[in-house]
Image (tube, grey):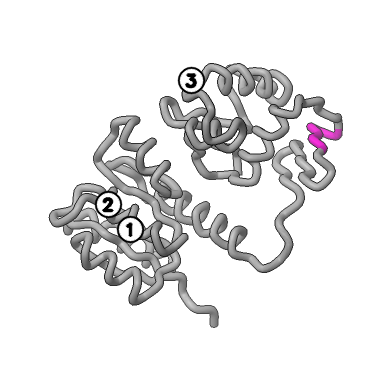
């Protein structure tokens, strides 16, 4: 019998906490509960959970500060589950190290899908095996070792920057990468924060990869936040 993966729920609202616990336990995860930030941090260091569901509006310290403290000592996947819907809050959480961001209210299937994605990404990152060399999804194949992109068997000719963008998104498939994160990774830490250069390159990529660039299948836009590659 395999050990159950442990999910720490840091949520002060009892009904929402119960709802999330019911969802994860039904899928045979082990659930831990904390109702404030300090107890959540303590449980994180004591129990070493596999994933954390973190509310931002906690009664003692702000959830964003909890996230920063967790990231100071751990790479445990953290999914922010919050009623804060402003784009700047989502961007800030992702830039501070959150793996994903779900706004309340949410459905059980959405929550479980985000949990599966975060846990898979953690497994890929921590796996002692060599880094995955190929991304393959519905006809799109990216061979990182050969720097080769094909779509339904046909070579796709990308510029150096376009390839770097596609490669970065593919290696983080299923995760939202913020505009700022992408700009700094591709163009360096002193990159201009204007997203125009990123939008132009992404438009060119979609014309080459997507059957209908206006309704993308492989690379999704999280408006005001960033981009997510189909997992």
Q: Do the residues labelled 2 and 1 touch (CB within 8 Å)?
A: yes
Helix, strand or loop for disc 3? loop
Could you tell me which quadrant the C terminus lies in?
Answer: top right
**Distance (Cα) linking label 1 and label 3:** 29 Å
**What is the magenta range?**
148-153
What residue is shown at x 60% (from left), y 30% (from top)?
A: 187
**Distance (Cα) linking label 3 and label 2:** 27 Å
Determine which of the numbered discs, if any, sits on residue 194 in the image.
3
Residue 47: image x %, image y %?
A: 36, 75
Does residue 149 belong to the magenta stretch? yes
- The residue that mark 2 highlights is 65
- Whichever of labels 1 and 3 marks the residue nearer the N terminus, that label is 1
Determine which of the numbered discs, if any, sits on residue 69 in the image.
1
What residue is shown at x 28% (from left), y 56% (from top)?
A: 66
Which residue is the extreme one toward the left?
59
Residue placed most toward the observer, 47 or 216: 47
Q: Residues within 10 Å of mark 2 (few under 14, many from 20)?
A: some
- Residue 98 located left or right of residue 138: left
In this picture, is 32 found above or below 1?
Answer: above
Residue 115: image x %, image y %?
A: 45, 55
Helix, strand or loop for disc 1? helix
Residue placed most toward the observer, 138 or 103: 103
Q: How many numbered markers are drawn? A: 3
Q: Do the residues labelled 1 and 3 touch (CB within 8 Å)?
A: no
- Residue 68 located left or right of residue 51: left
Which residue is the extreme one toward the front?
190
What residue is shown at x 50% (from left), y 37% (from top)?
A: 181
Secondary structure character of the magenta stretch overall: strand
């Amino acid at each position: 019998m395999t050990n159950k993966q442990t999910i720490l729920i840091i949520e002060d609202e009892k009904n929402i906490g119960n709802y999330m616990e019911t969802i994860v336990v039904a899928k045979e995860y082990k659930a831990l509960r904390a109702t404030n930030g300090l107890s959540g941090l303590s449980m994180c260091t004591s129990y070493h959970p596999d994933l954390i569901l973190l509310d931002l509006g906690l009664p003692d310290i702000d959830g964003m500060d909890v996230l920063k403290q967790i990231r100071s000592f751990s790479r445990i996947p953290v999914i922010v589950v919050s009623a804060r819907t402003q784009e700047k809050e989502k961007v800030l959480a992702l830039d501070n190290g959150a793996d994903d961001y779900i706004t309340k209210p949410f459905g059980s299937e959405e929550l479980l899908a985000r949990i599966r994605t975060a846990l898979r990404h953690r497994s890929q990152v921590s796996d002692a095996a060599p880094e995955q060399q190929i991304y393959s999804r519905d006809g799109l194949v990216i061979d990182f070792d050969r720097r080769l992109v094909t779509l339904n068997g046909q070579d796709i000719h990308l510029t150096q920057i376009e390839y770097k963008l596609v490669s970065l998104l593919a290696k983080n498939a299923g995760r939202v990468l913020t505009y700022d994160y992408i700009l700094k990774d591709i163009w360096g830490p002193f990159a201009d924060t204007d997203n125009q250069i990123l939008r132009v390159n992404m438009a060119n990529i979609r014309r080459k990869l997507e059957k209908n660039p206006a309704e993308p299948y492989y690379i999704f836009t999280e408006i005001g936040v960033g981009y997510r590659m189909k997992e």
